[in-house]
Amino acid sequence: MRKFLIIVVFLASTYNLFGNAAQPGIFGAGAFGKFYLFFPEDSIYFKKIQMQQEFITVNLYNGFAVVKGQYWMYNHENDTISMKVGYPLNATYIYNQSHEATEIRFDALYKLKVKINGTDQELLQLPDTLAIRWNSLEQMPNYDNTAIDWYIWETTFAPKSATKIEVWFIVNTNESLVRLGYNNKRYNGFIYVLETGSIWKNPIEKGRVYIQFKDDILLDNIHGIKPDSIFGIDNTEKNLLYDFSNLTPGFDDNIIITYGSWVENFNWENIIEKYEEYYSEIDKSSNTKINKSDFELTKFDDPYEIGSTWWVSLLMFLFFFVIYGIPILVVLTIVIVIVVSVKKKKKKSEKLADLT
């Protein structure tokens, strides 16, 4: 019996060794964050501009999200500050947590539009080789930056006053994958990288994230949100609200949402062609009069979870048992038989010796 238990423990250890080869996490989610200092000479202004207020509006659709960001940036200096800021494009950043990974993917930020104090800005697209590497300054997030290009523009901040910067763009959420063990789900994934606000002078005094569900998306279609207890939902169950104040954001403040499912035959080009309609719609959303008392704080499920995978685990156990377990079991059985046989022969020899 003892030998049998040893074999079972050994086989279980072998399964654990090979059973977690696929790292769990969220991969390929459509994401966006804040703008960054671009040229090295502008680094002298680091932490001199404060993001006093940040209002983010997101319209979630099946397969994509439309985003409008409004930022009030305050120059604490007595002099005018001019700097080039921008968004990374075609970049992927993967956070490896203790037991899960979060891949933050910035694609082309389609149809990016920028206004400063209500005036449209001319955007330049420059190669990443001209940019400050995000991890070249201690204060910046330690990402593995693989950006190919950046959209940049020049911003002038008047002394002792706030400058309003507005951005609009569309991200593809239909390419995300949530993986847990050897099971995966093709949910839509959206990430807002709130932590990048920490590169500016802290804290963010006042902020709001307002999310509307579009198409036929309902509360039941939301698989998970992280952080799980910051959003309130109204009685229509179509609007989410998160207000914060005096926040110095870190990784745990990043907003991760999984919803719906993969849209087959998704026509991304058709979505982009109609961007003006979507921008007009999100302008209406951003101007919605909000009564905070209409929203009830709700705890959401974990976006990294994809339901029970016991049957997948069982199949994997059977697979590894056939590949590794049976051969090991055969070898151990042979060894045991040989050992038992040797002991029997030894005992028989000792008995014969006693008789003589």
Image: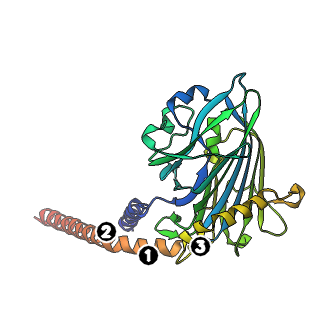
Say what amino acid the circle numbered 3 marks.
Ser
The residue indicated by pointer 2 is 324
- Disc 1 to disc 2, C-alpha distance: 14 Å
1 or 3: mark nearer the eye: 3
Specify the quadrant that holds the C terminus.
Answer: bottom left
Which is nearer the eye, 57 or 243? Answer: 57
| Residue at x 27% of width, y 71% of height | 327
**For residue 218, what is the image quadrant?**
bottom right
Q: Closer to the N terminus: mark 3 or mark 2? A: 3
Residue type (three-letter) at the residue carrying disc 2: Tyr
> Can you give x and y, in whole percent of width and height, for residue 306 in the image?
58, 68
Q: In this figure, which residue is indicated by the disc labeled 3?
A: 261
Q: Position of residue 51 (x, y in %)?
A: 71, 38
Q: Tell me the CA gap for discs 3 and 2.
A: 36 Å
Q: Identify the mark nearer the N-term, 1 or 3.
A: 3
Q: Check disc 1 and report its element: helix, strand or loop.
A: helix
Closer to the N terminus: mark 1 or mark 2?
A: 1
203 vs 125, left or right, is right
Q: Which residue is mark 1?
A: 315
Amino acid residing under circle 1? Leu
Residue 25: x and y, percent? 52, 59
Q: Residue furthest top?
A: 78
Q: Is residue 81 above or below residue 299?
A: above
* Label of residue 323 in the image: none
Whether 191 is drawn above or below 348: the answer is above
Secondary element under disc 3, as helix, strand or loop, is: loop
